Image (cartoon, rainbow, N blue to C red):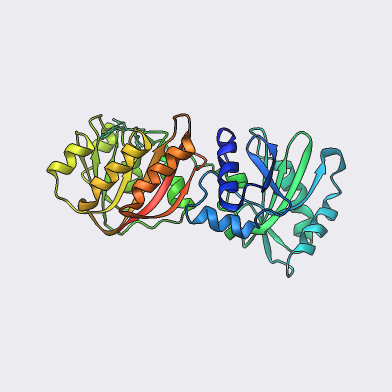
Amino acid sequence: MATDSYDLAVREIRDEFGPRVKVERVSGDLGRVTGDGPSIEELAAACNDGRIAFVRHLTAELASFGVSEVPPAHELVELILAELPRHPRALAVQTWTDGASSGGSYYHLLEGPLTDRGIEVSRARQEHVVSCFASKKNVLIGLNRLDLSLSDWPGGRMRLARSDDRVSRSEFKLEEAIQTFGLRLPDGGKALDLGASPGGWTRILRHHGQEVWSVDPGDLDRRVAADRGVHHVSTTAGEFFRRNHTRFDVVVNDMRMDQVLSARVMLDAIPHLHRGALAIVTLKGGGRNPLDAARRGMEVLRKEYDVQVARQLHHNRNELTVVARAR
Ligand SMILES: C[S@@+](CC[C@H](N)C(=O)[O-])C[C@H]1O[C@@H](n2cnc3c(N)ncnc32)[C@H](O)[C@@H]1O
């Protein structure tokens, strides 16, 4: 979960699994569900079907130690292997800290003895993930199947390479959503980008093979505007819907507006969408009660869309990314 949204995540967990579920804060953005709380499977299911949005990463705790009491690496490895149903051919090791560093020294600490046991070690894309979170005081070891982690990045902190062609910071949000939720955009599809300026999302949609209608009274970056697969319509979403009769396979919405208003614009989009069209929306946070506002926004969306997942991604600030399908 994000540090600012920690309390919202705890509230969602309790709303879903009961007010008595105990969540202890381990660091800024890391909490530990203790006692009779939900299992990692139950939590992952709630996060993957839109019931919980402010949790972005999960791991099942195996052990935790004070920093001065961490056992030698080969003992940690025995502990990890004892927990697995069979000797693994490969394991992912993901390390992070409560600061900016990646906790790389713990990766190397575990890599040696795991390799000695004939196990291929990598940072991602394995069936099982060993997590290692290090704070100034504690080291926490987790182990779970990748499909329960929610993201294949240490602590959910996705790092995307900056490209020279990048036109906005927002691009990362769309790229992260596409990767994290494994979204496939239709080959040669028509996509509508609402609130497109300066064109970051449009650029990503082009990379994914879409012809894009980019709607925003603001300008597009000239490199994006020069692309013949991009149609900039310099107007508001409402005006666009009154005038345009194209049918879209994909609609994305990164408009800067209140959650409920933004969701209502998505309802106006429905007559312009094919059935089953993919929708990716950022519901911008803010207000005194961002969780309730986000829930109201999703309630509006649900009138015409099947909401598949909602999550505050690493590159989101005070906002949620919602993935839905038009009914
Ligand atoms: C965060 S920016 C979008 C950034 C964009 N996704 C990118 O990657 O470059 C939000 C945009 O929403 C636009 N916007 C706000 N209200 C709008 C409306 N009613 N119709 C169209 N665009 C709108 C603003 O002009 C602004 O450019």
Vertically, is 227 above or below 59?
above
- Screen quadrant of the C terminus: bottom left
Question: How many marks are shown on the rendered structure?
Answer: 0
Residue at the limit of the structure toward the front, as seen here:
19
Residue 169 in sight from this viewpoint = yes
Residue 316 in sight from this viewpoint = no
Point 86% across, 48% down: residue: 71
Asked which quadrant contains residue 99, the reply is top right
Residue 108: image location, x then y, percent: 74, 47
Point 67% across, 62% down: residue: 90
**Is residue 313 or residue 228 the one in the foreground?**
313
Residue 11: image location, x then y, percent: 57, 42
Left or right of 284? Residue 48 is: right
Residue 229: image location, x then y, percent: 23, 46
Left or right of 175? Residue 209 is: left
Vertically, is 274 above or below 167?
below
